[in-house]
Every structure is written in structure tokens, then in C-alpha cells.
Amino acid sequence: MSKGFKRALWAVIVINGGMFFVEITAGALAGSQALQADALDFLGDTMTYGLSLYVIGMSVRARTTAALLKGFSLAGMGLWVFGSTIYQVFVLGLPQAEVMGLIGFLALLANSLTVLLFLRYRNGDANVRSVWLCSRNDAIGNIAVMLAAGGVWITTSA
């Protein structure tokens, strides 16, 4: 594994960890389940990127097990997001659309930077590919958060 990939991985761990704290705080203050869910995704990415860093140079079995663990963690987060979104809509009420949109845009910038950092490594083994794919998919998810903010703002409903 190249030293460049390891440096990029460390940079992305710092970016994702920082964005977790930004989004979890903003999501709680704005009452935005979308931001809190995205914050959880940033936390999950921080942990899975750390796992990817840990298994670099290990056996194929260890790297494959790490990739499988990442998949299960993503499934668990998806179930949590689904349940908490239903709770937000039916119990908690209207989030602050402006905060959602602004923080969603900041998250899009962070994930776009991550995608660019990993772009040249996207064809590696399952762990390397999963890092790039997660970052790319997260950038797409940030666009969905911004669209959700627009929907909240336009309809004035959760």
C-alpha cells in the first residue's frame, strides 16, 4: 500500500471526524434528523476508514473481514436512520431548513474533497474501493440533505 494512500486516509479520517462534530451539533440545534443521520455517517466513515488503515498490509482474509464489517455497520446505520426519521416526522416536527441547507453544503464540500483525495486509489482492493465508494456516495447523500432542506423550506413541514 502506498504512503500516499495512507496520508490521504489520515486526512480523510480528520475531515470526517471533524464533520461528525459539526453536523451532530448543528443537527441537534436545528432539529434536523437529516443532519444527525449524516453526522452518524461521518462517524461511521471515520471508524471504517480507521479500520481500513489498520488492515493495510494484512492478509486477504483480514481485509475481507474488515470490508464485511463495514457493510454490516452501514446496514445498521441505515436502519437507525430509517427509524429516527419516522420519529422526527411524526413526533419532533419541523427542522430548521436554512441550517440543514448550509451544513449540508459544508458536508458536500468535505465529501467532495475526500473523493478527490481518493480518486487515484479507487481501483485498489475491496477496502480501498470501499473507501472511495463511501465518499462518493456520501457526496450524493449530501445533495439529498440539501434537497430535503429545500423541501422543508418550501412546504414548511417535516
Image (cartoon, grey):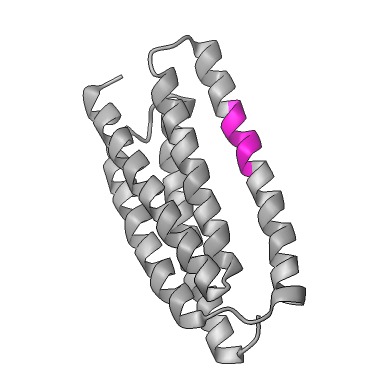
Splitting the image into 4 quarters, where does residue 52 fall? top left
Name which residue lies at 31% across and 19% down. Answer: 1
The answer to whether 38 is drawn above or below residue 66 in the figure is below
* SS majority, magenta: helix
Q: Quadrant of the C terminus?
A: bottom right
**Residue 107 visible in the current orientation:** yes
Task: Where is residue 143? Give x, y as percent.
Answer: 46, 67
Name which residue lies at 66% across and 57% down. Answer: 81
Splitting the image into 4 quarters, where does residue 56 fall? top left
Splitting the image into 4 quarters, where does residue 68 fall? top right
Q: Is residue 11 left or right of residue 30?
A: left
Say which of 119 and 30 sits in front: 30
Q: Is residue 40 left or right of residue 76?
A: left
Taking the magenta stretch, the answer to whether it contains residue 71 is yes
Name which residue lies at 45% across and 81% down. Answer: 98
Q: Is residue 108 left or right of residue 151?
A: left
Task: Where is residue 149? Give x, y as percent.
Answer: 52, 78
The answer to whether 82 is drawn above or below residue 62 in the figure is below
Name which residue lies at 34% across and 55% down. Answer: 110
**Residue 130 visible in the current orientation:** no
Residue lying at the far top of the rendered structure:
59
Task: Where is residue 138? Give x, y as percent.
Answer: 47, 53
The range drawn in magenta is 68-74
Say which of 26 and 120 sits in front: 26
Number of marks present in the image shown: 0
Task: Where is residue 136? Give x, y as percent.
Answer: 43, 50
The answer to whether 156 is drawn above or below residue 81 in the figure is below
Taking the magenta stretch, the answer to whether it contains residue 144 is no
The answer to whether 48 is drawn above or below residue 32 in the figure is above
